Image (cartoon, helix red, strand yellow):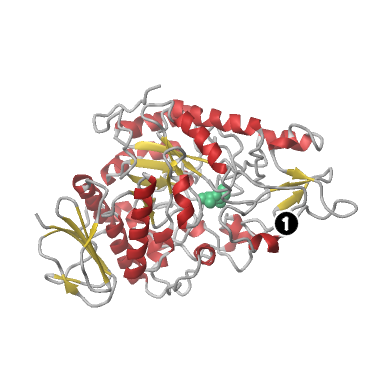
Amino acid sequence: MTSTLNTDQLLVDDATWWRQATVYQIYPRSFADANGDGIGDLRGIISRVPYLQGLGIDAVWLSPFYPSALADGGYDVADYRDVDPRIGTLDEFDEMVEALHGAGIRVIADIVPNHSSDDHVWFQEALAAEPGSPERARYIFRDGLGADGSEPPADWTSMFGEPAWTRVPDGQWYLHLFAKEQPDFNWDNEDVREDFRKTLRFWSDRGVDGFRIDVAHGLTKELGESLPSQAEIDAITEPGAHPLWDRDEVHEIYADWRKVFDEYTPPRIAVAEAWVSTPRRPKYASAEGLGQAFNFDLLEADFDAEQFRTIIADNLALSAASGSSTTWVFSNHDVVRHATRYALPPRNGSTVKQGLKWLLSGGTKPVADAELGLRRARAATLLMLGLPGSAYLYQGEELGLPEVADIPAAERQDPAFFRNPGVDMGRDGCRVPLPWTRAGSSFGFGPDGAHLPQPASFGELSVEAQDGAPGSTLELYRAALALRHELQAAETLEWVRSPSDVLHFARPGGWHVVTNFGTDAVPLPDGEVLLASGPLAGNLLPGATTAWIRTV
Ligand code: GLC
């Protein structure tokens, strides 16, 4: 099978395009709305292809666009091989792929294999079928405990804070590690395995270049006869010993998928969303498996030179050892936007789990200093775009959008908000529809309103307001991405000695990246300043600023 890429900017047989690619995440329902129903759609994306091309990205990753009741923003998939009619049609999908490919932009689709929607035909069949039936065997059904089975099979808590087992009318219970509308698949079941192979081929045949694998560390579970309690599970620290997450058997599935990816030219790529400890990550990124894995370490770090230095060095060593390239990301649809995060007090090295809770808590109060947050975000991004490996950007960060903190409860959508009243603000604040124009009922998002309320400040942050404006965040991203294409060479980096608050590294070809994490200005290294994330003070680099310098 050959790829349908039809642009001379891309080589059809380039199997390594992903290694240092810049991938832009589109959350389709909030990107651009062409039909005026307040929900972004594929026609909206098609209409913005010139914008994406002008930005200088290499690929887009589309969060789920499949039919869904939106119990979890589309990550509750009712049909893996179709498009939500509110978002478009399969024909429009083909048109979108063609338009993106024509602009030299690859397409990555989001695959959600840990769970389906409870609207999925298989789950509906499972509900209609008897306990013990083949239909139920595609999910994880169990009898309850107690004389009448009215106690759940275990006291587990789901990721959104509710009990992880829900009872069905005939008395059995099913497992859902996320919302109750997201029943977990049973990956020991061959129907499930075969269906996902079919899905991967379905989208690959339509020209999709790769896949982002949702909750890639879920899928396989070790569920014996008697289930451990939540407290027992929480006490497990030995890598690979957790019954629900990051089990070694999951890699058999990805080895199988690799065969599917390799049926295509170039092979389809995949990136794992696996919230696992750093040493466990290479397995997901191995060439025999998915090939690449998200590295969320920088996303979880404070704006701090030492934390950044350690994370960068560790991850480059790790990726060199696994043969993959590393990935960098600051923002996505699950976390508080980094322009806001960097305005908050530092977390002082709390653990991944605490960090995640903090990030998902939508903790935008107190927003100490929004201007400082944006300055740091721009500096961090310019540093990231100078690193070897691939960079994942999230729609709207190129506009410096902040997290929208004050969405009224009645207008919120995220289950994380509703299931943890007063504790978790949920993720709607980073999913607010993009502002394209200074004015208009939805700032140009669509001809009518937007499905989440946009703040008045979005007008001045709109594409229209920033387009061509010297020093705007949009122009910074455009300039950085254009230069990155020009400068990107071998995936190597050399540290240059610098004061403790400053990170300085050199890439092949005399490309230097210097970030001042502190507050006092420091001397810039000699050379031509190619780009800076903020104003320079003569030949001094002010605090919270990054500069790219060419020395040859
Ligand atoms: C991933 C997605 C998140 C979703 C969850 C369940 O973490 O990024 O948005 O809620 O999986 O599918």
- Across and down, in percent, residue 447 comes to 43, 44
Which class describes the residues within 10 Å of circle 1: few (<14), some (14-19), or many (20+)?
some
In the displayed structure, does residue 525 sit left or right of residue 368? Answer: left
Vertical placement of residue 533 versus 170, above or below: below
Give the residue displayed 43% in from the left and 29% down from the top. 262
* Foreground of the two, 111 or 456: 111
Vertical placement of residue 3 versus 110, above or below: above
Examine the image and state in which quarter residue 189 appears: top right
Q: In the image as oriented, which residue stretches furthest toward the right?
A: 147
Residue at the spot of label 1 = 228
In the displayed structure, does residue 509 sit left or right of residue 484? Answer: left
- Across and down, in percent, residue 496 comes to 20, 64
* Foreground of the two, 549 or 206: 549
The amino acid beneath tag 1 is: Pro
Would you say residue 417 is visible in this rendering?
Answer: yes
- Across and down, in percent, residue 235 comes to 64, 64
Q: Is mark 1 within 8 Å of ligand 1?
A: no
* Foreground of the two, 409 or 2: 2
